[in-house]
Amino acid sequence: MVSFRYILILLIIFSTQSINGQYTTKDFNGYLGGCLAYDSDYFYSNSFNGALNFMVKFNITDYFNNSVVTLNPVETPMTLPGQSHEFPQLMYTKSNAGSNYLFTFSRLTLLKILGTTPYSLGLINFLSPPTVSPFLAVLSNLYIISITANSGTDYTIVLYDFSTSTPSNVGLIPLPYGPPTSNLMINENTKTSYFAAASGIVTFVYSNTGLSNLDILTTAAGTTTNTAIMSNDYIYYCSSTATDVTLRAFKISSQNATQDLLNAPVTGGIPYYQNYIVTNSLPIAAYDSQLDIVLYLMPSNINGTISYSLWIINDVAGSQIFSKTVIENLPAPLSTKVITNDFIGMAQLTIFRQPTKPTKQYASYMAVGNKMVTIPYESFCPNNCNENGVCNNLTCSCFSSFYGTECENDKPTITSVNQIIYKSGDNITISGSYFYVPTVTIGTSACTVSSFTLTEIICTVGQDFEYSTNSYDLTVTVNSGDSSVIFSSVYSFLMPTITDYSQNGTVVYILGQNFYNTSYTVASTPAITASWESSNKLLLNVPKDFQSGAITLSCAICPTLPPLSLNFDLILESVEPTTIFYVPTPVTFSIWFYNAGENVTINQGPTKTFSVAPDQNKMFHMNSALDSVTVPTNRYFFATSNQVVSNQIQYNYKTPIIDSANQKNRTIAEVITTGMGIDSTNLLVYFNENLTLSATPILDAVEGIKSAWYVPIPLGSLSGIITFAIQNYTFDKNLALAPVIDNVEPMPLIDDGGIITISGVYIPNNFYLNGSWSNTLDLGCAGIRDYSNSKYKCEVPAGTGYFTVSVIMDSLNDTYEYQFQNPVITSIEPNITKLSTASNVTITGNQFADVDLVVSIGGRNCENITLVDITRIECQWVSPSSKPANTLLEVLVSVDSLIGKSNLVQLHLDCPKGSNNQQCSGQGQCQVTTGICECQSGFKGDSCGEEDKDSSESLSSSPTTSLPTLSLITLILFGIFLFNTL
């Protein structure tokens, strides 16, 4: 490929070229035509095998390879479409949209070829057969301007759109100036077009939508114009008279074709014409746009012999001073096949460059014998300008990277310059090449060179350098001013930039680059200050109540920096204390980077939250949660503000204690605790380590960090230890339970004692018996346990009277008063007596003992009591002398204060005697239990000694009882009769 660097060089240099008079030829295989086009890699030409037309291409490098004698096509020739029945007349290569298109033309068709695919674009002439070969220009957007023949001498300029495979006629304009005598020339910058006609240079304007402004620039009087070509701002053309042909030129911008800037007579004969049709007998031309050089392959008729010469016309550096070089006796161009009797297709002159030596130019055309003729045109200056420039009027015009009369010196180059921070004291390092004795300036101030090599300069900016605007020319000058180079980019000092910020707890930095040690101001709300730490870090002094917002940093030479948005992590700096009670405990928090003016939410664990406002010192105070007896696995505080969550700080609980545990009543114990609140969620209560109980807080008993609890007492328990457990924490207290004897049974026998059952609660097997008849006796008992009571069976010895059963538990005890069985009286003899009668009495019964033995009958004690045995007592007793209230007398036996009694003795009383000294006067019945007479009928009085007259009359006057009885029976029967009748 042609080097882009050299193309740029050639585009900006106008140079005088010399021709050494040499040309070369090289054979090509195939039936070649006169067309010739090229790109960076290939030559393109046409071929005809007598039946079909082909497109062939050859490697350019093969042409310059001396070992290649004959060039062969590099690929199978491309067969052109069948409608291309005529040999192509012209070829163009045209780059468009990144693709290289090859255009071929015949009088009938246009082919557009991309890669290996030809697209036939249709007829370009209106009539068939055409009478004129195509005159065309291809625009970069694939629009094509063509001049076609309508009929005879009528011609039309047509604008086609060939961007697709189907052409479209965009616009046309009639041509009144006769047939063209040159191909079309275009200036795509001004969108104007030119071509030669017999009477002058025809101009018009084109656009994507049509053609306009057709005009003609007439040339010198008495001349005929043909074979024109356009350079950058000049049109070169042949003008002929009857006797000679002259090459002429005029400046396009002057629009004056009669102003001859070049007058170069053609020697060696006069070209000939036939019917104004361009043939190979007319000049064929090419234009080297890179060097502004026009080349003509000129035919001349010398005494009937046609000779060919190459004319090279160049403008010396655009000075309108033209020179020419002529190479004569060149091989004849290859004529295409005869199309009509008056027309033979013309050859094509092409300019190309050698790929490996892009400074060498070549004019080339296809000659008779399947040969390509190449004429080099090169520079001729001393040492060939060391190949570092081009020769211009025998003076080297150096390429941009060289200097010297022969371009022998490399200009210094600057490839890189390190930037430094303003007033940092750092050195500037300039890298590049060819630094011969350099001096350096930045703007108008010197940068003092401390050391240098050919490829590196180190210099120091003076402290007196005054900063103005951060844009300076950095210039390196070498060889005492022979050459200098300016850094391609303006030099600027490294300016402070902000890239980010970092937060490490409460320490916040602005991160960036090129911070130099100066004062910085920060615009923010609340106010923030900044201090320099290093070239890439500033320390921000941020208040506690700044969580998020935008800040703007500025300094003396800082550029306008965009606001930096800060969103700080919320920092829980400290918690005091970190050991709290299970009850609400005052806690103080130090929190950084919360939203000013807003409460902060303080979280105790995952579920308990508190909205807290800061005090004047920006500290936060709260009481821990009331129900903190629930001990989470992870105990921590954290804070949230504006949905930002802080770090966590662990806390611990102070271990709770049981202050006291006392029995409140028979079934409830009251426990007083410190530091555990009133939440029983995770509270376990044990008594004597093996019972799980429930605890109920006494809400009205909470005072400060103390709380009270009611705990049920298992009835079958004894005094022991009550334990509270919260997860891994356990704390306990002794709980003394007062023993209670509820019942003792049965009563023991006085003669044998026996087994008694003692029932109660909280009673241990530690019983004592105490009675008036015995010292304290330790009972041996066997326990009977159930779920609700405590029971023991104990053996009691023989005894009498009352006794106590005591149970002792440490300092607590309970006593149950009990007794032996009472005496039992079953009979007494005699059991009938009279007043004031002395009797020997025998009492029969049980549980009789001679312990404080007392016997009484009717309230009168027996005397001379003898205990015969446990079942019989004998004694002497005198009945009452007067009638008691109850004549059935009570017999009472008291043994050691235990009493047995029964009404067994009947006292018989005498009734009053009448005058006859008989009880009841013999006229009534004596009731012995009461001593009252029951008189017979007709008698009355205490002794029945009086006649009862009222009783006798009543008896004699009373009717018989038979009649009333009969009447009653009759009434009853009559009632039954009536009931049955109804």
Image (spheres, helix red, strand yellow):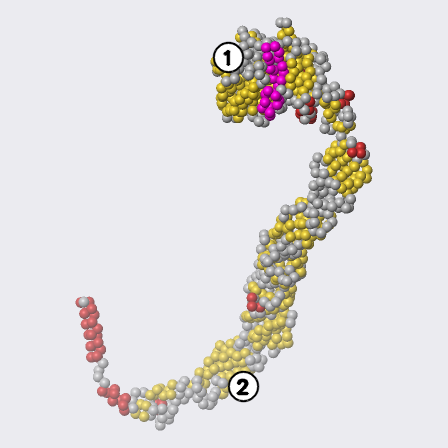
Do residues under tags 2 and 1 come within 8 Å of each other at their CB atoms?
no
Residue that mark 2 sits on = 863
User: Does residue 942 appear to the left or right of 550 in the view shown?
Assistant: left
Membership of 253 in magenta stretch: yes
Q: Residue at x 64, y 22 (%)?
A: 289
**Residue 759: percent from left, percent from top:** 56, 68
**Residue 747: percent from left, percent from top:** 55, 72
Q: Secondary structure at mark 2?
A: strand
| Amino acid beneath label 1 | Pro
Q: Residues within 10 Å of mark 1 (few under 14, many from 20)?
A: some
**Residue 32: percent from left, percent from top:** 61, 10
Q: In which quadrant of the rendered image does the C terminus lie? A: bottom left
Please tell me the numbered disc located at residue 362: none
Q: Residue pushed farthest top?
A: 304
**Residue 184: percent from left, percent from top:** 57, 19
Q: CA distance from mark 2 to mark 1?
A: 187 Å
Q: Residue at x 58, y 63 (%)?
A: 678
Q: Residue pushed farthest bottom?
A: 915
- The picture quadrant where one finds residue 265 is top right
Q: In which quadrant of the rendered image does the N terminus lie? A: top right
Q: Earlier in the sequence, mark 2 or mark 1?
A: 1
Q: Residue at x 55, y 80 (%)?
A: 897
| Amino acid beneath label 2 | Glu
Q: Nearer the viewer, residue 508 or 629?
A: 508
Please tell me the numbered disc located at residue 130: 1
Q: Which residues are magenta?
A: 234-259
